[in-house]
Amino acid sequence: MASDSFLKTEITFLKGVGPQRAELLSKELGLLTYNDLIHYFPFRYVDKSSFTTVRESFAITGPVQMKGKITKVSEVGAGRKKRLTAVFTDDSASIDLVWFTGVKWVKPIIQSDKEFTLFGKVTRFGAKYNIAHPEVEPYEKTLSRVGNLQPVYNSGEKLSAKGLHTKGIEKILRTLIALIPGKIHRTLSADIIEQYNLMDREEAFRQIHFPESNELLKKAQMRLKFEELFFMQMALIKQKLITQRKTRGYVFGEVGIHFNTFYNNHLPFELTGAQKRVVKEIRRDTATGHHMNRLLQGDVGSGKTLVAILSMLVALDNGFQACMVAPTEILANQHLQSALEFLEPMGVKIGLLTGSSKTAERKVIHEALEDGSMQILIGTHAILEEKVRFKNLGIAIVDEQHKFGVAQRGRLWRKNVQPPHILVMTATPIPRTLAMTFYGDLDVSVIDELPPGRKEIKTIHYFDSKRLLLFQFLEDEIKKGRQVYIVYPLIEESEKLDYKDLMDGFESISRRFPRPEYQISIVHGRMKPADKDYEMDLFAKGKTQILVATTVIEVGVNVPNASVMVIESAEKFGLSTLHQLRGRVGRGAEQSYCVLMTGYKLSQDAKTRMETMVRTSDGFEIAEVDLRMRGPGDIMGTQQSGILDLKIADLAKDNQLLNLARICATELLEEDPDLTHKKNLDIRQELMLQMKRKTHWSRIS
Ligand code: ADP
Ligand code: MG
């Protein structure tokens, strides 16, 4: 059996590379070993299966391939303006060729009477046609080539200057591929290869660089993608198992008076099936002595708060304290209100801690937390501070976790002798592929059902010219007793401009909806927190009918009587923000609306975003579109982009394969957790190798 020593060879030893090029390849592309080089895959392939005639080529805009002779080769100009020209002729017509760079490489090749294969794009200059920088090769070489798909590699100026343009890279890869028979070590077991019908690894490397057909190329890509995703999942799941084994969790052995009293006497409505299921999952986790580390995904309005409250009550029943961290003060306040409303009648002691808590209040809270008299603490980042200590914290809940970094969540782990159970909640659905990669070491629960009786929010896209119509509509809704949000962008780079838009908008709305008949609240990022809360409160209590705001209201705010969400300059918002904002309405029994206002001029991306919003209100579907448009790096932020360092798999496109890889990894680790079975030795070795190479695969969430 081949060992991995072949692939560890430094590329400088490969024929045609040498020290100078090796250094360049290392500097420019990070390629050090045969292993790196063989994983430097083509970024596309040119289909060279068909030939056109020169005459036909005049009418074709894309690249063409032709067969003919090259004559009149001459160098014109001098110094930096030097270029190479020639004429290409077949039976049908002639066309001019020109090269501005690489003259000394091309000239000797084309000065020959042979037949050539020419590949390039035709450009028209008045009545004349020419091709700049065509690829040329002797036709006999084309004939001997197996397969019609030619690899194209990413290169760069510095590389090209040393002959390492795509053709040059292709050449050294041909040399490498010629060496590999019998030298590629196995990474998967025969079982897996058979079960998933995967191509042999050596064959896959050959076919991905020099495919013999489209079909074989697909199989090669599938094999290599599967392998990449499989090892990533193996690393994540293994990490999860190790953490689970190492970390003991507090045992919430019983469900007692708090939970039961609330559940039987105070629960304002029947839980949805999904809520019940998730509560069960959480109870199962916390009852066993395992440490719970769970992500709860649920679309906006799916009722996550209630699940959080029920989980906290289980902690209380077992003599523990609980805390809940929210990303904004408004949201923390709102959670406090719900918790007070639900739990105060039962005598549960609840506190609030935010950035604007006064020193004197803090002192009281700190003491009550340390002596255990305060059972539940709700707040913002302030809770994470070192000096906030609990007597016996049993569970920590993070709401809207996408607003928190990994390190911030990590601090919750240290809030008790053993880490408290952790439940992180998010209403920004993360596409399954991303959840499986970024939160691959968490357990995931999903609330995929909205409380009954909700009407689907009607979403409309208006151009600015429909503003009069919009105002009339708002007036009608307000007359019916409803409330309205009007949201303006507040983007940091253009803060001044956005502020002006907001204020201009506020003025024109005030003119159209004058006092005392109408009352308008305004909330934006430049206001003091206390003022924001005051205005929000007026709106929440129904004392104002219109809330003009920036995206500070993006997450969590709950005013069931509000039925219209107007989003101004909607084209400036990303899909997940639009979806979050829309989620502020549709929380009551009334028909709700979301109106997206934009200018006429929209980019293609903006159009897609508007169309997606109008078409669907399924957060998971929106997340998928978002992923396809923006890519995983943008969605998850660069801070976590290490994991995106995938060579061939694409998290936006390969979700099916990722699913398979995850299932495969899960089953394998269930059967052989330490990979000690003989048939899994190759896997074990490769996993260790990869985990060493990719340190970011350990503990990311
Ligand atoms: P989110 O998941 O977005 O945080 P919330 O927890 O704020 O959602 O719940 C949204 C609204 O739905 C709240 O007004 C809440 O009281 C209500 N709600 C939650 N669960 C149910 C249920 N089972 N039946 C009816 N209404 C519910
Ligand atoms: Mg919420």
Image: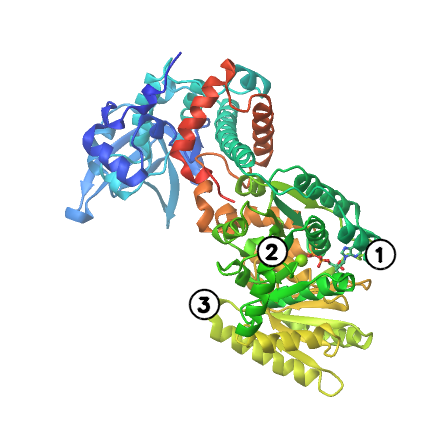
> Marks 1 and 2: which is nearer the front?
1
Reply above or below: 485 against 613: below
Q: In front: 538, or 293?
A: 293
Is residue 531 visible from the viewing direction of this image?
yes
Which residue was labeled with disc 3?
Answer: 493
Q: Is residue 678 left or right of residue 542?
A: left
Q: Is residue 600 visible?
A: no
Asked whether 462 or 306 is in front, the reply is 306
Give the color scheme: rainbow, by chain, secondary structure or one colour. rainbow
Q: Which mark is residue 400?
A: 2
Give the residue at mark 1: 265
Three-letter amino acid code at the position of disc 3: Glu
Ligand 2 has an atom within 8 Å of the beta carbon of the residue at disc 2: yes
Q: Which residue is at the front of the view, 326 or 9? A: 326
The disc, 3 or 1, on the residue closer to the chain's N-terminal end is 1
Q: Is the C-beta separation of discs 1 and 2 under 8 Å? A: no
